[in-house]
Amino acid sequence: MVAVSVARVSRAFQEGGRTRDVLRDLSFEVERGELVALLGRSGSGKSTLLNLIAGIDRPSAGRVVIEGQEISAMDERARTLFRRARIGFVFQFFNLVATLTVEENVRLPLELGGAPAAAARAEARRWLQAVGLGDRGAQFPDRLSGGEQQRVAIARALVNAPAVVLADEPTGALDAETGRLVLDLMVDLARRRPATVILVTHSQEVARAADRVLVLSDGGIATRASAGASDAADADAAGAADAGNSAARAGPR
């Protein structure tokens, strides 16, 4: 079954009186239970594409359909409610609520969905234990390292058993061992639930674990590759390009 359908999607931004086309006539489908790695240079539209799939943003043209529902046609409130119930999002820069404890951050999606308080606490603690932070629930985010905050963000994205998980560089701030733990969680999620996982990465290990690798270039998908050594090489090349163009991260991606 098709879980995510992107049909002839374009997204343009106005910059200094000029129109910048970030995505142009982009089409692909992702099956339920599939884990897809998304590669591309800085500015190629990776984060922009994740935002469109999540309904955080809307395309300038085209359709985005999630689990049979056209999220791109919904109004803002409907998109928010749909995202809350069906989509987990791991943001590149964490987006944790500074005034909530670690456990409260992880519980938040469940509480917004109306879960009983005791069940929400138990599930949040289970996911914190799964990402190696079972003893940090009472801390506030600013007391954690960047890698620990990323793990909290991952637990928050997965706690609500979403049908679709979108992750923007989920292992980028993690050490190798913790990165493998998080990757194993996402692979397990895709295989056993099953959930659909789409993640932006420059990691060889993540690219090799994916069922499929999509490479964004010049506003569209330049290649559709099977996971393997060639994709890891693509990931390395994209990572090297990012390192040499870090200033581009400030704009749409």
Image (cartoon, grey):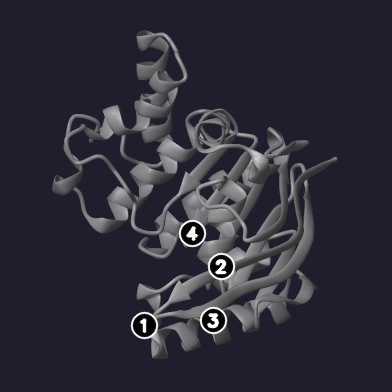
**Residues at marks 2 and 1 touching, judged by CB atoms closer than 8 Å:** no
Q: Residues within 10 Å of mark 1 (few under 14, many from 20)?
A: few
Marks 3 and 1, Cα distance to the nearest angstrom?
Answer: 10 Å
Task: Work out which residue is located at the far bottom of the displayed protein and give it.
Answer: 244
Task: Work out which residue is located at the far front of the displayed protein and give it.
Answer: 17
Labelled disc at residue 246: 1
Q: Position of residue 181 (x, y in %)?
A: 48, 50
Total marks in image: 4
Q: Amino acid at mark 3?
A: Arg
Q: Position of residue 223 (x, y in %)?
A: 77, 77
Q: Nearer the viewer, residue 77 or 157?
A: 77
Q: Residues within 10 Å of mark 2 (few under 14, many from 20)?
A: many
Residue 6, image quadrant: bottom right
Task: Work out which residue is located at the far right of the displayed protein and give it.
Answer: 1
Taking 53 as reference, is 221 above or below it?
Answer: below
Q: Nearer the viewer, residue 231 or 14?
A: 14
Q: Residues within 10 Å of mark 4 (few under 14, many from 20)?
A: many
Query: Of marks 4 and 2, which one's residue comes earlier in the chain?
Result: 2
Element marked by disc 3: loop
**Residues at marks 4 and 2 touching, judged by CB atoms closer than 8 Å:** yes
Marks 3 and 2, Cα distance to the nearest angstrom?
Answer: 8 Å
**Residues at marks 3 and 1 touching, judged by CB atoms closer than 8 Å:** no
Taking 196 as reference, is 119 above or below it?
Answer: above
Q: Amino acid at mark 4?
A: Asp
Marks 4 and 1, Cα distance to the nearest angstrom?
Answer: 16 Å
Labelled disc at residue 148: none
Residue at image point 19% right, 41% down: 98
Residue at which label 2 appears: 46
Residue 15, image quadrant: bottom left
Residue at image point 58% right, 52% down: 58
Query: Of marks 3 and 2, which one's residue comes earlier in the chain?
Result: 3
